Amino acid sequence: MRNNKLLFALIWATFLPAYWLTAQSAGLLVSDEKYRQIPVLPAYSGVKYNEIPVKVSLKKYCPVAGDQRRTGTCVGWAVGYGATTIQRAIQTQTTDKAQITQYANSAAFIYNQVRANHTDCSEGAYLEDALRVLKEKGDCLEASFAFNPDDCHSLPNDQTFLEAQQFKAQDYAAVFTLDEEPKNKIGKVCKVLATQTPLVVGMGITKSFFDLLPGATQWDPADSETVNGYHALVLVGYNSVEKYVELFNSFGPSWGQNGFIRVNFADFERLCRYAYVIVPQPNTSTTFAPTATAPPVTAATSGEAPVSAQYALEGAFAFRQPSGSVTNAYGEEVMFFEEISTKVVPEWPGNYTTERPVFNVGDVFQLVAREVPKGRYIYVFSQNAQKEINLHFPRRQENMASAGFMLEKTVEIVIPSEDVLLQIPMPGYEHLCILYSHAAIPGFDQRLAQLNQHNGTFAEQVEATFGDVLIKAPNAQFSPQKMSFKALADPVQHQLAVAITLKVYAQ
């Protein structure tokens, strides 16, 4: 039997593609500086977000594994053919692998535009550049711009660029920072996967990665192995009982288990240096196959009046104060909060005051944004009694900025964080504003800096500053008590956002 195994290994090595035997890298170029420039997912909260399933698998939404051959195109395969295709299948709940593969997104459309070396197809690319292309230009179908291992120089034509616009990413973010404790990486990627969202990862790989035989289910690199390059893959599942993650590769269906491989938690934490989440554009179609080769005609392309394209937008906002502590399931003392009742100002829909008329200087509180659809954005800022403006979300720090979108409707954003409180600093009125938006608000920082230049009440200043992107009545409706709304965003008409304001008085 031992001789038979040895004979099989020798036969397999004879026919193994040469790049598996000789490659020192699978095509991912890495730059810590580029990674640091990408906003990081904020600390989401919420019971459903924190209590993740025991296991998650997105394999049923994956196309047949592609084969990058001897090229350094893994970035295109992971971002385009892999993650973008998988997300479209999830949005439309398509699980027919043949159909998913037939209408998969292109690897070459992405790679050919971002490759580092214009004369050498074995040269890799940066994931950050690929993500930028996906957000700005989209990605056409593989059938429209097919991968050719002998030609990475050709660029898409105008019609292909038009088709690609159907599949633009809404946004993207880093999942963890470079100084993240390895033990925390698994928790963060599993929470993202639990929202039915694949991740693109950049992992260090060793020689044994290329030596895996057909049918191998797990890669178990020894701690002593030297990382000899980085590779882009798609993270599509985890199992917290057997403690492994599952990755979708681009070495063809004959590699590993039909193109998939498992990696135990400890090895993943040690070798995964970069992780990215991509938020797709909202999709109202239930069909996986594109209905046209180009996006709907708008004023930008036809010179005629734009055609409206409405998308549901909703959200809720809570103002709460600590009222004691409780013991959680782990025996830890955690704060217990009381949500303060509010009422709408009749003449100003979307503007609220507290039922409690007066608070005390020094009182502490938190803000909670919830019930926001996946991929939609929130902005939270305040104006104190001295007219000073403070931005609370997205968070901006010297070496890190947080992403401004919600990962899933089940998650919450607690401001400033679950274990930190805001404080009313002085007597007078404290004004709070939360903007819910279908897409990133253009020029938000510049707008906020100019808010106090407008006259009137705080609500009037918000209207003057953001009015051109606010959704107008009757497309925005507000609850009379609870700070919540339902609206129809119309990006073509630039009606993107809804503003909720709260006035709090302290003495």
Image: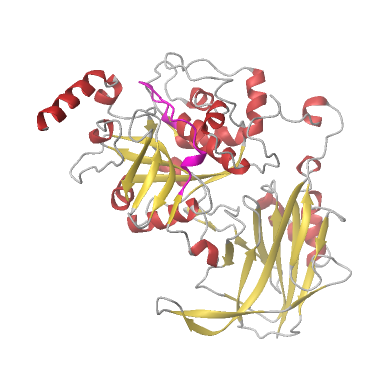
Q: Nearer the viewer, residue 143 or 30?
A: 143
Q: Is residue 207 above or below residue 409?
A: above
Q: Is residue 434 above or below residue 235?
A: below
Q: Position of residue 248 (x, y in %)?
A: 41, 37
Q: Position of residue 399 (x, y in %)?
A: 46, 53
Question: Is residue 268 visible from the viewing direction of this image?
Answer: yes
Q: Is residue 73 magenta?
A: yes
Looking at the magenta stretch, what is its main secondary structure?
Answer: loop
Residue depicted at x 84% and y 53%:
475
Q: Give residue 341's quadrant in the image.
A: bottom right
Q: Nearer the viewer, residue 402 or 243?
A: 243
Image quadrant in which the C terminus is located: bottom right
- Residue farthest to the left, as pictured: 3
Q: Is residue 219 magenta?
A: no
Residue depicted at x 82% and y 57%:
476
Q: Is residue 162 above or below residue 224?
A: above
Q: Tell whether 223 sits left or right of 267.
A: left
The colour scheme used to paint the residues is: secondary structure
Residues in magenta, as a range:
57-75
Count the marks: 0
Q: Give residue 333's quadrant in the image.
A: bottom left
- Residue farthest to the right, as pictured: 347
Image quadrant in which the N terminus is located: top left
Q: Position of residue 350 (x, y in %)?
A: 80, 65
Question: Is residue 37 visible from the viewing direction of this image?
Answer: no
Q: Position of residue 231 (x, y in %)?
A: 36, 35
Residue depicted at x 63% and y 41%:
92
Q: Tell whether 394 sits left or right of 327.
A: right
Q: Is residue 417 above or below residue 214?
A: below
Q: Tell whether 224 sits left or right of 306.
A: left
- Residue farthest to the front, as pictured: 1
Q: Give residue 361's quadrant in the image.
A: bottom right
